[in-house]
Amino acid sequence: MFVIARAVAWGRLTAWLTALGNALGMLLLSVFIAVGLGPLLQRSELLLIVVQVLGGIYLIYLGIDALRHRQAHADDMVKVEEVKPSNYQILRQGFTVGVLNPKALVFFSAVFPQFVDPAVGSITIQLLIFGAIFTALALMLDGTWGILVGSSRDWFVTSKSRLVTLRTIGGVVMMALGIGVIIPVLIGQLK
C-alpha cells in the first residue's frame, strides 16, 4: 500500500524508487534476523513492541506530512513544477519503511525459521537465502504494482482538486497503515 500511495502521489519513478528502498530495507532486516536479531526479539517482547510501534509511527508521520503539504504539492504539480522528495529522500523513506516494517520483522523471524534444516547446512546462510528470495519477489511485485498505478497518475495532474483529493487519500492511507500496525500491538499489551 505504501508504494501504491506514492505511485498515485508522484508517479512511476517515485513508486519504483520507493519499492527499491523498501526492498533494501527488508533485505537489511532479513540480514539482522539471520545473524541474531530474530532470537533477541523472540526473547525481548519490549524490544519487539518498540520496533513495531516505531514502524507505525513513521508511517503516520509520512501520512501527516502528505496531508500538511497536499495543497502546496497540488499547486506546484498543476504548474508542472512537481514538488516531491528527491530521489535520495524517496529511497531513504522506502528503506526506513522496509527496515522498520513490523510485519516483515515478525514474518522473517517467525516464518523463515520454520523452513530451515540444520542437516542442510548453516542456518544463518539458509535464512539469508530466504530473505534474499523474499526481498527480490517483493521488489518485483511492489515495483510492478507501483508502475501500473503510477501510470494512471497523469489523469490526476490535470486538475488541482483531483490532486488535493489524491494527496489527501494517500496521506490518510499511510496514516491508516501506521495505525493498523500500532493498534494490534497496543491491544496485545492490554490482554
Image (cartoon, rainbow, N blue to C red):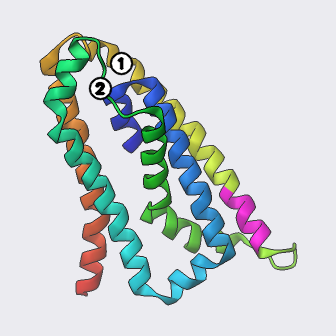
Q: Is residue 188 above or below residue 130?
A: below
Is residue 91 highlighted in magenta?
no
Q: CA distance from mark 2 to mark 1?
A: 19 Å
Residue range of the region highlighted in magenta in the rendering:
124-131
Residue 20: x %, y % from top left? 55, 40
Query: SS class of the residue under badge 2?
Result: loop
Residue 21: x %, y % from top left? 52, 44
Query: SS class of the residue under badge 1?
Result: loop
Residue 12: x %, y % from top left? 45, 24
Q: Is residue 61 above or below residue 189?
A: above
The N terminus: image quadrant? top left
Q: Which mark is residue 152?
A: 1
Q: Is residue 65 above or below residue 42?
A: above
Identify residue for label 2. 83
Please report the residue visible at 60 percent of the width from the left and 37 percent of the height from the top. Answer: 140
The C terminus: image quadrant? bottom left
Please report the residue visible at 33 percent of the width from the left and 37 percent of the height from the top. Answer: 5
Could you tell me how many numbered marks the image carries?
A: 2
Is residue 127 highlighted in magenta?
yes
